[in-house]
Image: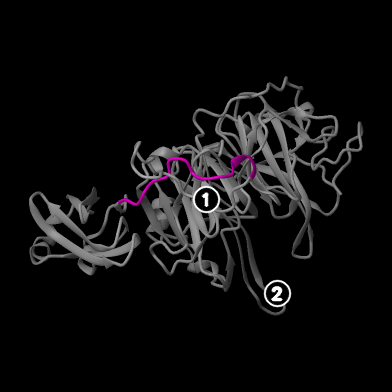
Amino acid sequence: MPVRLPRSSARRRLPAGAALALGAAATLGAVTAPSASATSVAYLDGGALWASTLDGSRKVQLAGPDSVPADAGAFREVAAADSGRILAVRRQDGKVSQLNWFQTVEPNGAEGPHGSLPKRNGYLSYAYPVTLDLSADGAFVAYGVSATTPAYPVGSFFFGSYVTSVASAAAGVEPIAIGDLESPSVFGNQLVARSHGDDDGVFVQAPATAPFGTAFQPWLSAGLQPGYEVRRTDVAANGAVAAIETLKWNGGTREDGGIVVVRLVGSGPLAERTPDGASLCELPAQGIAQDASLSQDGGSIAWKDDGGVKVAGAPTGPGPDGVCALSRPPVLISATGQMPSIGGAVVDVLRPPVPAGGGTGTSTAPGTGGSGSGTTPGATTPRLVLRLPTAKVATSTLRRGLRLRLTAPAKGTVTVVARSGSTTVARGTAKVKKAGAVSVTLRLTKTGKRRLSRLRGKTLRVTATSGKAKATGSLRVRR
């Protein structure tokens, strides 16, 4: 059991009178309105990737476990950036970590960089991503990793974090490895992590070397009872509040744990901000709460517990029993959801609602219930969606054939044409038996093959058609 507070018998994962209370107490102001900048929460449900408004009034499925590529498996992890980019990782059951597939959804709903999250070579067995997070601008991804090569009498081990740009990950470039610092989250572009050898502490990366530097300094010390450990810590983008996850293991099973929320005092670098001990409280939860995610302004908090994915107003401070009093009651986003991540994506931009009179405009989301139950008002009817890579494409890729992913609105033939000026340089077609995900390989025409070298540095106009439906986009070619 965690430390008991001197002033009551309420359980707390982090003691208010211990090392967390490093600075002068500050007044804890209630935040009663949802964040203006944090407009959605991304989460996983039934192996699919979803996004929801913070009040649960509108939910959209961004990609399912059977979406292209169909053999990538179910979605396992997700992270949402303040910028609106969402990155999610897929993996088939029983497959090793290296056989993952990540894909990104851009703020406008288009597909962004995708590929396999890379590893550093040198070990036989890997487990990653243990945790997953994006920098505020969505350009960098950080994920926890453990790696080992068994040997007698002593094997080799690595516990820590990988950091890389999303573009480099899509290109298969090895990430930067930061040893010992694990379970990373990102504050701006600065890592916040725990030390593998210190169950009690939270460490902050030196800002001058973020996000790839190995210089970290101790920040918070929890003072936990034996058997408990600090895991991931999420910090609001404005640096005003932190949510700290703690766990107690029984073998490989989570036996106890929760989420502690504390206000931070100060306006300087994160490492200089101190916790307000008077604000310390434990998030109310069914069973074990985990996967804490704070909105950019610290006004909303999401988490997952035995009741599902929930979003509530940020705590106003502890109640009489040490449990957080919330500025807005929890909304149940999904009873079967997991790994919520609050970000800047706008749900109606990711999937525009159906215009008035344009069909039923509703779809049932899995795992709904409670305050956020029911249908998804304004969910889209099937439409043609063209997903193009945001990174520049090599001419060698065009020579082999570029596989594109689309969503077809109905049964029929999908045609994709790429033009340089008025000249068609590549074309692809695919037949679909029903509305949904489809893969089309864009192959060079005879003219495209002759002009391939002259396409370097060009931007191609890509048009997809399916019946009367049409979608367009741009494809940039590397020099």
Please rate how many residues cluster around mark 2, counting C-alpha atoms within 10 Å: few if below 14, some from 14 to 19, many from 20: few
Q: Which mark is residue 365?
A: 1
Secondary-structure class at tag 2: loop
**Magenta run includes residue 425:** no
Residue 235: quadrant of the picture: top right
Q: Residue at x 78, y 41 (%)?
A: 222
Q: Which residues are magenta?
A: 370-383
Under mark 1, the amino acid is Ala
Labels 2 and 1: the sequence-earlier one = 2
What's the residue at 7%, 63% (across, down)?
Answer: 447
371 part of magenta stretch: yes
| Residue marked by disc 2 | 154
User: Tag on residue 163?
Assistant: none
Decide which of 20, 381 is in the foreground and name it.
381
Tell me: residue 258, above or below residue 150.
above
Q: How is the protein colored in the picture?
A: one colour
Identify the residue at image location x=63%, y=28%.
240
